[in-house]
Image (spheres, coloured by chain):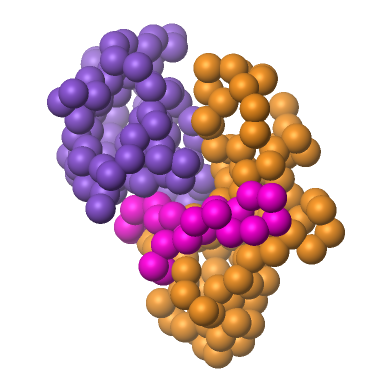
């Protein structure tokens, strides 16, 4: 079964450094999402992306964050100047545009395995 | 805003049944998902309800009442491997998650 993949699995960085987290969506999926989960807390929505533009973003997704799909396959999340509080698991999720496959669950978002970001 | 509530923890015995309740008050609604999450891993899909009623998938069932803003996940014939966190998530084109219910299955 197709899977969403994410790299790296673990990223350690110094405060103030830039990081880029990468996601490879399932090939026929057109909606892309980033979520984060701080240790011991709930999963939080960051941003959704469709048709090469942001469709919705949360208040967490401030000017330090950006997303792009640079080459038509990868979907990236960039944090320009990391802060200690950015330490979290970051999950990419993708969704098909149409009601095919498991038709009843066409709203299902498929999650990647996550990138654990540690900011020191 | 989004308000999604579920119990923090539940403990049950192997072979038993556990019901995890979720209540929600959200600005939009396009269905409700239940996910299972083991520590350090991604959420994995369990069930999806968009219409009122019960959906059954093997040992797992999920129920939705849209008028009451209420859902539950029923886990039957509990196994040790079912020890995990169970996440209720409201779909409004993005997912809004509850804090999760940690289920511990004892022998």
Q: Residue at x 77, y 38 (%)?
A: A27
Chain B is shown in which shade?
purple
Where is residue B73? Give x, y as percent: 29, 23
Q: Nearer the viewer, residue B40 or A45?
A: A45
**Left or right of residue A2, residue B3 in this image:** left
Q: Position of residue A117 (x, y in %)?
A: 55, 69
Q: Which span is picked out in magenta?
A: A40-60
The quadrant where residue A69 appears? bottom right
Q: Please indicate whether residue A91 sits to the left or right of residue B28 in the image.
A: right
The spot of residue B59 in percent (x, y) is 39, 12
Question: In the rendering, what colour is chain A?
Answer: orange
Q: In the picture, which quadrant includes the N terminus of chain A?
A: top right
For residue B66, above or below residue A95: above
Left of A37 or right of it: where is A53?
right
> Does the magenta run of residues contain A8?
no
Query: Foreground: A81 or A71?
Result: A71
- Does any portion of residue A36 appear in the rendered image? no
Query: Could you say which quadrant of the image residue B66 lies in?
Result: top left
Above or below residue A46? Residue B65 is above
The reply to whether residue B80 is in sight is yes
Residue at 18%, 23% in the rendered image: B67
């Amino acid at each position: 079964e197709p899977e969403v993949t994410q790299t790296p699995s673990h990223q350690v960085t110094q405060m103030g450094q830039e990081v880029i987290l990468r996601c490879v969506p399932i090939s026929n999926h057109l909606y892309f999402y980033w979520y984060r989960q701080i240790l011991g807390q709930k999963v939080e929505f960051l941003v959704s992306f469709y048709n090469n533009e942001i469709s919705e973003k949360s208040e967490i997704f401030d000017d330090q964050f950006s997303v792009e799909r640079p080459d038509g396959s990868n979907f990236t999340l960039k944090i320009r100047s990391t802060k200690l509080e950015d330490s979290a698991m970051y999950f990419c999720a993708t969704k098909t545009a149409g009601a095919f496959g498991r038709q009843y669950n066409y709203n299902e978002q498929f999650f990647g395995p996550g990138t654990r970001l540690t900011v020191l | 805003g989004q308000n999604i509530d579920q119990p923090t923890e539940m403990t049950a015995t192997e072979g038993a049944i556990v019901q995890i309740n979720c209540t929600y008050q959200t600005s939009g609604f396009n269905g409700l998902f239940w996910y299972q999450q083991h520590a350090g891993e991604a959420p994995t899909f369990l069930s999806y309800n968009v219409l009122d009623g019960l959906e059954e998938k093997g040992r797992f069932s999920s129920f939705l009442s849209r008028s009451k803003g209420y859902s539950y996940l029923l886990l039957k014939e509990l196994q040790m491997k079912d020890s995990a966190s169970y996440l209720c998530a409201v779909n409004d084109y993005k997912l809004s998650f509850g804090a999760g219910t940690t289920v511990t299955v004892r022998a």
